[in-house]
Image (cartoon, coloured by chain):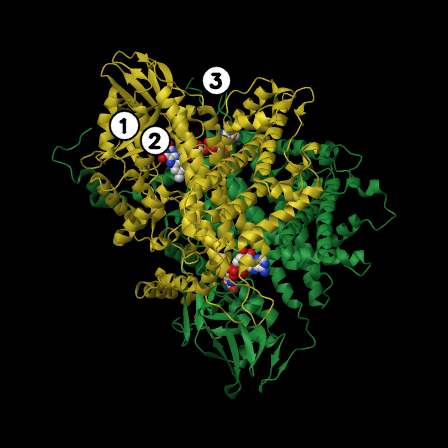
Amino acid sequence: MDSVSTQVTLAKERDNATFDPNLMDLFINGEAWVNTRGKAIDFVRQESETFDMSDIYFLSREGELNKILKQEKRVAELIKQGKLGNEDALAITYIQDASGPYRLHRSMFMPTLERQATEEQKKVFLEKARNYEIIGCYAQTEMGHGSNVRGLETTATYIQETDEFEVDSPTLTSTKWWIGGLGVAATHACVMAQLIIKNKNYGVYPIVVPIRSTVDHKPLPGVSVGDHGPKMGFNTVDNGFVNFDKVRVPRFNLLQRYITVDNQGNVTIPSDVDPRVTYSTMVFVRSGIVNNMGKELSKAVTIAVRYTSVRRQFGDDPNKPENPVLDYPIVQYRLIPLVAKTYMMLGMSHEFYANYERCRMAIEKNNDFSLLKEMHAVSCGLKKWCSDTTIYGVDTCRHVCGGHGFSLFSGLNTAFANLYPNIIWEGDNFVLAQQTARYILKVAENSMNSSPIESDDPTSQIFKKFKYDLPKRKISNNKLWNSEITPQTVVSNEQLLLNILAYKVAHQAYTLATKINVDKQSWNDSLVAVQILSTVYSEYMLCHYFYKHLGKLSQFNKPGSDKLASPLSTLMKIGALGFLLRNTGELYDLPEETGISNHKIIDGLETEYLNLIKSARKIAVPLVDALGIPDEKLNSSLGRYDGNVYEDYMTRALSEPLNREKMGDELREQIFKRYIEPVTKHAKL
Amino acid sequence: MTLNVKTPHSSETLENERTKATFSIEEMDRFINGDEFVALREKLLAIMRSEPDIFDQKSNYFMARTEKMEKALKQEKRAIELFREGRLKFEEIPMLFNMLDWHSPYHFARGIPGAIEVQGTKEQAEVFAKPVRNLRALGCYAQTEMGHGSNVQGIETTATFIEETDEFEINSPTLTSTKWWIGSLGVVANFAFVMAQLIIKGKRLGAFPIIVPIRSTEDHQPLPGITVGDIGPKMGFPTMDNGFLRFDKVRVPRFNLLQRFINVSRNGTVTVPSDVNPKIVYSALVSARAHLINDMGIQLAKGVTVATRYTAIRRQFGEPGKFESPVLDYDIVQYRLIPLIAKAYTTIGMNHEFDRKYKLTMEDVKRDDFTTLQEMHAITCSLKKWTSDTTVYGIDTCRHLCGGHGYSIFSGLNEFFSSTYQNIIWEGDNFVLAKQTASYLVKSAFAISRKEKADSNDSINIVRKFMNIDPRIALEKLYSWSEMSAEQIANNESVLLDMLGIRLWHLVHKLVVKVYRDGQKWDESSVASQGIATAHSEYIVCLYFGRHINQLPQNSNLRPILLQLLRVTAISGLLRNTGDLFMLPKKAKITENLITGLETEYMKAIKSVRGQAVPLVDALRIPDEKLNSSLGKYDGNVYEDYMKRALDEPLNRKGSGEEIRKRFYKNYIERTLKDGLDQKSSKL
Ligand SMILES: Cc1cc2nc3c(=O)[nH]c(=O)nc-3n(C[C@H](O)[C@H](O)[C@H](O)COP(=O)(O)OP(=O)(O)OC[C@H]3O[C@@H](n4cnc5c(N)ncnc54)[C@H](O)[C@@H]3O)c2cc1C
Ligand SMILES: Cc1cc2nc3c(=O)[nH]c(=O)nc-3n(C[C@H](O)[C@H](O)[C@H](O)COP(=O)(O)OP(=O)(O)OC[C@H]3O[C@@H](n4cnc5c(N)ncnc54)[C@H](O)[C@@H]3O)c2cc1C
């Protein structure tokens, strides 16, 4: 069979672009990020001696830590000199596709101080932290407790005689565990402990505890600390354990913005703060994850799309090149919806983040907490949805690459393993769904009790639109849709798609609320339905925010921006239809009057879905190019921009230690002498 | 809240769980795993435990890849000694490595004799296969190339007949023709079973196997014209030396072409022997997949053992004043885990029946009777897909169920996941395999509808039944569920089987219409094929597992729980995408009420198994050695073991660990903390 070079194939795919990928990049990633990303790329290229990651796949754990610490040191140095900001540091981590031991210092230790320390405490701790004179970590989780923070066992007991707190780990399971930055790097820990004053337990509060000497970095007296060993991924971070044997710290170290303890052991809660502020920290951290996931899935779909368009397998005509596997419908079916979801997450995050900022400003400026609850519910739901989608999306991208996906040189294996904790930390996904569902159910119950819905956030809008008709015990059915329901009307009308998705949320929420309130079904018995409700709701929110972002296109006044609308709309439809068809049972389950629960429509939608996917296939390569992921982050033979897949793959394989000159020769010689020769001796073939 | 509620120790919690068993663990072990397997397992464990310096696996988690490889080679060397002393059989060695929970670099070498015997003449088997059976020569199976995996006919390596010297010349004409992924090749093999395009007198005859020596039997150096190496680090499978191989016009005697299905004479005349049926080649594919299916049950058993024991112990949240609840008491945890226990049992249990059928087919094939081979091929394709999908993603669920600690290597589930993963790719990528099963079913159904001849077997008969062309069957009888409540159905495995059957028929029927009436191309049918292959598997595994359970006497106390597990698997399959049920024809009377009812019954069934969860995984008898897990240890000493392993992390070790930490500090951390500071040192 004739063959075509992979580079030529990829170039031809790029000719199919109906839009300018650079412009798309600006729109979907946003100008600010495109600039920050560009700066980070320039930086790592300039200092490639320190920042080149191409050998990472061969390094031992120690080697990985050594490499990343060297980079951390350099970045910290430049931050101190004021040449880089925190945003830049984050962008560099992103390009490097690996976190280091200082990550938690930046992402958790300092933010906690910013929010929970008094001005005086900030002067002492935060300023030093900003200047890297101390390196901190955030020590909440213990061996025995993660999800249930209230169950933590570490204690901080006030000792009035010396005006100190005594921090103690009373049991094996109270050992702090999983703490990033603690294993080898940190000098200080922000420890979450049960606050005990005069025998009274006040609950869990943060307290700053020095861990290692700032002179020689040796553990301080009473502190047992170490790295807790190899992990599935994230091995460039030194997650560690620490156990306190009655360690004393000054009273001052208890972070006292939300609680004050005086030297008599009197406890006061400042009147000007609302305890709900702690929620806002969680919302902040989860929103961060929500915003990151799209950027991470971008890497995986870039690799998978480029590779499946140059990978050829089977063909009908022996005189023609074989087909790119991306031409097979089943490959498109697995991959194209992930491209759509990537775009939707990226677009959504602009609007979602703007909403988060609005909520934050309302709290900070006017002490107005009215937006927080909804924000919290959405951030829990989207954190779960985005991380699930991304982690399993990366897995699908790996599998779609066939055998070569299994090689580390695909770039997808370390990505999968490093991203994986996002489904666990900051609230395990299965636990978070419960928080989201609780909130939706409350709004639904209000609607069922016909209390007027005052607020105008996206969740309220759903229930305003689909009111509950109490006597009929279902959604009131006057004028459900603004147009007739046929497969064609549904796919040609984003607003209708959104409405159907919203209807599904309302329907499931009312049904579950009825089961719980009327049929007295227990919460534990509702947990499966709760997971589904959270998913359906998040799917709607994703579409809602993405659609809102598409609305911004008209203000995006750049030559050629009109060409962006059509592909973006196709992606939105693929995403939304995919949600409708995820489990068609959910559609069949809807009341007949919706007109969408019959198999004629559903079969029709399935056909439309496949057609849309096929239509996006043509522009798949330009779409992933527009995501703007540099080769450095891809670190992949299969996903390279230039399409030199096989050459690069071979080059990398040749540098495998077992193949290297001398070192490899010796390894193999040794293996032969010790194990193979004694077994096969005197063999003749 | 009070802090001092003293929770029971984790090992005590586990002991309490064990008292709930309603059946004998020993009896269950023997029934589900089979006497033969139990005996082998015990024999292998005895060997492993008597030589801990070779077989202890605890330290593996800290090793670099080459160290792991070396350790596995050492174990293999010992295994071969035992084999030569007559204490281990050739076929038993893979199970030794399964218990060690990784692979020997010789793994693929052991598969070579079988491949040669299928493809070669008797004489060739004698010359090439026999030395491998004695491990005097080490082969590898070199089919996949950098550029071609799924499409074997597309491979580029050539074997050209050179009449002058009566040799074949093996050549790798392009970069993408480099043999790739070949297990046991990177450092071990000294010859390769190479699939190459046979070219004789300028004519291309297709891909055929040929034996090519690659390393010297004297000093193991690559032979002239051979470039060979390891392909580098992978997601998992670290002990395996998957390799690459290139030929620069390497000559081998004509004799090395395996000639059971094709003969090449001295002057290059090609003949196809009339006395062998080329379908035999299928039987090799079938065998490889049958082994894989068998493996999957054991692997999933490890996953659920770790997750069940740990979630029974792990306590999180609860009411004030009481012990916190084991997370296994949360419905959503049960919903994620219990169906996997059921599927582990189903996979292992159904495998007995599957294996019986498989052996019968192999007997048939030996007698040149190919009537059962086609169904066997369809079944192995779909079961390979189903068992590997279920197991790989089941292990992932087990890991996630363990929360943060699942992410530690000491959970035992991470390298394990990564090294089980390739089963969804090799021996036919799962997405490619589905088509084979679907096309068999769809073609047969079409033939039946046209009153043409079609096979009569489990797979086809169920489709035929619901095509309802036999007017003698009354509809109530055909739709056995139609007069029943959801609860009655959920407790009746034969009705559940019928429901799985009608769903399979309907999916097949829909595709028949699309392909034969609407003229849809097969390529366009690959999405629908996935659903058909899965529905087919779900029917077959339940059917087979049910037959295995029926071997038990009616009054056996194993029966009730096994039937319950079977039902959980069956309902789980039915409810996977309820849309498939909703769309069944109205006359089948599978109503919305019934479907919602089944969802309720499903949760009830899951909960009813919760009490037996720990005894059930105990009875699978995955030894601590294979678990190699702090979280899943039999004795429940989770946290103590976890701490011990963490302390053993190289970074924490006395001496060597201190050295590393000092170096990190001096080179980087101290520089971060102190560079650019004025003298006033920061003391806090
Ligand atoms: C790589 C990594 C880095 C980390 N870094 C840090 C760090 O820097 N600092 C820090 O403090 N922590 C850190 N963590 C810890 C992380 O926050 C916890 O692992 C997480 O909160 C989950 O808690 P857990 O591990 O105790 O899981 P568990 O709570 O034990 O969960 C076990 C299982 O039970 C289920 N479950 C629990 N409760 C319920 C319920 N009520 N209902 C239903 N199901 C339930 C969960 O879904 C899960 O499947 C890190 C973790 C990882 C993996
Ligand atoms: C750990 C490991 C060990 C291995 N050991 C060996 C060994 O010892 N010897 C050996 O010879 N090989 C070995 N292999 C190779 C293995 O057999 C191949 O990887 C496998 O056959 C898949 O082929 P591929 O990698 O070329 O994938 P491809 O065929 O390139 O597949 C890429 C993607 O395209 C899809 N696709 C391909 N064709 C079609 C189609 N017609 N329709 C729809 N979709 C399609 C696939 O589903 C996949 O998603 C090993 C592989 C691994 C991962």
Instruction: Give, as a three-letter code, the residue at label 1.
Output: Val
Ligand 1 within 8 A of label 2's CB?
yes
Subunit bearing disc 2: A
Estimate the x, y position of residue A385 in percent, counting from the top left: 50, 37
State the residue position of label 3. B321
User: Chain letter for yellow?
Assistant: A
Residues A181 and B41: in front is: A181
Question: Circle 2 — which element?
Answer: strand
- Are the residues under badges 3 and 2 in a single subunit? no
State the residue position of label 1. A209
- Assign the C terminus of chain B to one quadrant of the image: top left
Disc nearer the start of the sequence (2/1): 2
Estimate how packed mark 3 is, as few (under 14), some (14 to 19) or many (20 or more) residues with alpha carbons within 10 Å: few
Q: In this view, does A375 lie above or below A641?
A: above
User: Chain letter for green?
Assistant: B
- Assign the N terminus of chain B to one quadrant of the image: top left
Question: Circle 3 — which element?
Answer: loop
Estimate the x, y position of residue A236 in percent, counting from the top left: 34, 45
Q: Which mark is residue A139?
A: 2
Report the side of A644 relative to B421 (left or right).
Answer: left
